[in-house]
Image (cartoon, rainbow, N blue to C red):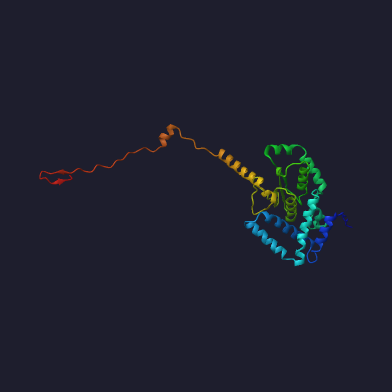
């Protein structure tokens, strides 16, 4: 007999569950969840990234997704988003979407997928943030990069963010980078990082076969990955840091560029072409013959 996991839900989670289940009458709960996180992530991303082909592709995906639901069902998705925003605002020390994912037993659709409980992530974050090395990096560079290559719903990064806030560290001192092979999990992480004001990005790709490449501030977009930048990543401070980073890379490349050295005097004498001075031949002068006739010869 399978063991039933009993989870005690708080008020926000109960409200979320009630609204969520009202949409699952004609579709599976897994599909409703996938559509919810997709449309919420698109709404956040396109609010700050309003131009370019990526914006248009995501906008089209949003419209194609929402049109699959009846008008009364469409109105429930903004409610789910509002509950999520309110829950993280009231209590940021939680993995709200990860807990809801597990409480709704959606993890059964992924073999072996289980999100690390938030309290465990918080313990790991305290061990990492409070050991002093983080402060040294921030003093030297002004900011530090925090990466989770198998982020899930982002509980570990959320915990690091909360520990840094408790230590009164500026939100501009950390760049949060996440990657996961599962699209829904990665978008859950993106939503929570965005709502908590974290600067960074989430990469949807296999970390082992297609790791994110390029500078930390300038990840390279390829056909094998999908990168989602949080709204705070577009802040002027991070934009200026990217500019300074690019200038630094340019200066370094110029410093290591090969310099042409002049040839020794002996080699220049051999390799230089001989100078040949040419002058036009003088025109023949006119002269008179004995009879007084002009002649050229």
Is residue 110 placed above or below 157 in the rendered structure? below
Residue 256 in view (yes/no): no
Q: Quadrant of residue 256?
A: top right
Q: Is residue 286 left or right of residue 61?
A: left
Quadrant of the image containing the C terminus: top left
Q: Position of residue 60 (x, y in %)?
A: 67, 62
Is residue 206 placed above or below 261 in the rendered structure? below
Name, please, the residue furthest toward the top.
Answer: 265
Is residue 10 placed above or below 63 in the rendered structure? above
Q: Is residue 112 left or right of residue 213?
A: right
Name, please, the residue furthest toward the right.
Answer: 1
Residue in the image at 74% along x and 60% along y: 35
Residue 127 in view (yes/no): yes
Quadrant of the image containing the N terminus: bottom right
Q: Is residue 24 left or right of residue 263?
A: right
Residue in the image at 70% along x and 37% along y: 139
Q: Quadrant of residue 2?
A: bottom right
Q: Is residue 279 left or right of residue 72?
A: left
Front residue (pair 6, 175): 175
Q: Position of residue 165 (x, y in %)?
A: 77, 44
Tally of marks: 0
Front residue (pair 183, 64): 64
Q: Position of residue 227 (x, y in %)?
A: 68, 52
Q: Position of residue 288 (x, y in %)?
A: 14, 44
């Amino acid at each position: 007999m399978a063991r039933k996991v009993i989870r005690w839900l708080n008020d926000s989670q109960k409200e979320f569950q009630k609204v969520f289940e009202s949409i699952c009458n004609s579709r599976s709960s897994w599909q409703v969840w996938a559509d919810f996180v997709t449309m919420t992530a698109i709404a956040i991303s396109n609010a700050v990234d309003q131009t370019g082909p990526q914006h248009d592709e995501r906008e089209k995906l949003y419209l194609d997704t929402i049109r699959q639901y009846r008008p009364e069902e469409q109105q429930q998705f903004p409610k789910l988003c509002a509950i999520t925003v309110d829950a993280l605002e009231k209590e940021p020390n939680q993995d709200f979407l990860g807990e809801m994912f597990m409480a709704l037993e959606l993890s059964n659709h992924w073999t072996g997928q289980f999100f690390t409980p938030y309290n465990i992530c918080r313990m790991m974050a305290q061990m990492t943030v409070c050991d002093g090395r983080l402060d040294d990096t921030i003093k030297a560079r002004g900011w530090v990069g925090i990466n989770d290559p198998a982020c899930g719903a982002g509980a570990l990064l959320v915990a690091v963010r909360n520990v840094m806030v408790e230590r009164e560290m500026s939100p501009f001192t950390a760049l949060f980078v996440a990657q996961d092979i599962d699209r829904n999990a990665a978008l859950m992480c993106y939503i929570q990082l965005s709502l908590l004001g974290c600067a960074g990005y989430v990469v949807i790709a296999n970390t082992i076969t297609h790791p994110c490449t390029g500078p930390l501030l300038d990840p390279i977009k390829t056909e094998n990955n999908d990168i989602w930048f949080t709204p705070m990543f577009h802040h002027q401070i991070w934009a200026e840091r990217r500019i300074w980073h690019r200038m630094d890379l340019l200066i370094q490349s110029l410093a290591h560029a090969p310099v042409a050295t002049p040839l020794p005097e002996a080699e220049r004498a051999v390799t230089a072409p001989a100078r040949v001075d040419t002058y036009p031949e003088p025109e023949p002068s006119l002269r008179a013959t004995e009879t007084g006739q002009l002649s050229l010869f």
